[in-house]
Image (cartoon, helix red, strand yellow):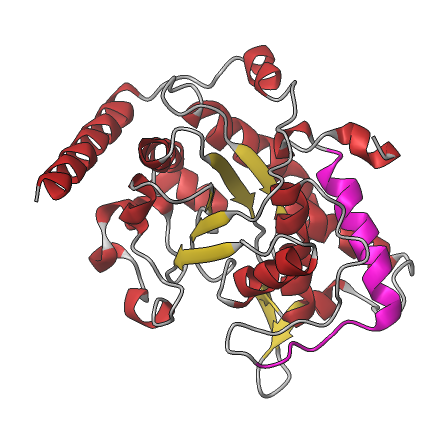
Amino acid sequence: MKRRAIFGAGLASLFAGFALSRALRPKPMNPAQFAARYAVPLPGPGRGLSVFHLGHSLVGRDMPAMLEQLAVAAGFAGHRHASQLGWGASLDQHRIGPAAVPGFAQENAHPNHAPAESVARPGYDAVVLTEMVEIADAIRHHDSAAALAYWARAARAGNPEVRLYLYETWHRLDDAEGWLTRLDADFTRAWQDALLRVAMADPDVGTIHLVPGGQVLAAATRAIEAGQVPGLASRDALFSRDASGALDPIHLGDAGAYLIALTHFAVLYHQSPEGLPGALRKADGQAAIPLAMAAVAPLQRLVWQVVTGYALTGVDRAKVDGG
């Protein structure tokens, strides 16, 4: 009973802090101060991590399951994961509670679900936070930076040494601005300036690193459409199709989920995914449709190049040269 009372008081304090952050609306962190936060890379974890994924269908069930298989294959047998998902749910909707999360019952009917508020308890080494898309609407209508700061504080209440990540996602293939154009522009104007720099202006938030999912998809698309990835012809190969064969313009298929799982692995474990298995299982135990064998190594190399190309990932860029 005493432990529950302490936990309840901690959540009350976090909610109070969220209300204050909304009222004060901090200015974005100075660009020089922001860059300084990433001047020193994180050390590699050296062991399997307990990871919590908070988000929606661009996380999904399959990608975290694939990530766990990759981690085990790389020797990190202690990796385990939990998640709370929704249908296009924002971080703010997750903060409000299950009744505010669209599709809560359907998306969390699986054994790896854990309540979002459990991140405020000890036990997680890394928490990966995912904002809804359309990202511009999330920023405009769902107070994304304040919600990101709220979940960061909650996770640090559970484990002061927790590694926090913002998972950069993407938008619809048919976006009016152009899919690649948006990915290029949103990286700075949305994910960095409107989310990270604002959330991290709160001194209790600390540093939030980045999982550059959108940037990996952009780089993969450019490589595929330049003929540099055998067996893949266009960006459509990364996205899912319904039973009639119609392309889903935002949700990934097995190939895309594999690519994003590689990205998470590289960021979380500070290791190149080169040489890891190309054939994995989905969350329900069924075999994922594997990439053509000739495509696996080029995409694994590409993921490592992208991840080590951004200081925001926390991965030591010297590792590109084998350092």
Q: Is residue 80 left or right of residue 254?
A: left
Along the viewing direction, whichever of 145 and 259 lies nearer the viewer: 259
Confirm whether residue 231 shows in the render: no
Where residue 40 appears, x then y in whole percent?
Answer: 65, 20
Where residue 11 appears, x then y in whole percent?
Answer: 20, 37
Farthest residue to the bottom: give it.
244
What secondary structure is the stretch in magenta mostly built from?
A: helix
Q: Is residue 293 left or right of residue 286?
A: right
Confirm whether residue 170 shows in the render: yes
Q: Is residue 93 above or below residue 194?
A: below
Along the viewing direction, whichever of 295 and 88 lies nearer the viewer: 295
- The residue under the point 42% across, 53% down is 55
Q: Is residue 69 left or right of residue 144?
A: right
Q: Is residue 277 above or below residue 148?
A: below
Q: Which residues are magenta?
A: 286-309
Where residue 202 appears, x then y in whole percent?
Answer: 38, 20
Q: Is residue 28 above or below residue 226?
A: above
- The residue under the point 63% across, 40% down is 46
Q: Is residue 292 left or right of residue 70?
A: right
Quarter that holds the C terminus: top right
Along the viewing direction, whichever of 279 and 172 lies nearer the viewer: 279
Does the segment drawn in magenta span residue 292?
Answer: yes
Q: Is residue 42 above or below residue 279?
A: above
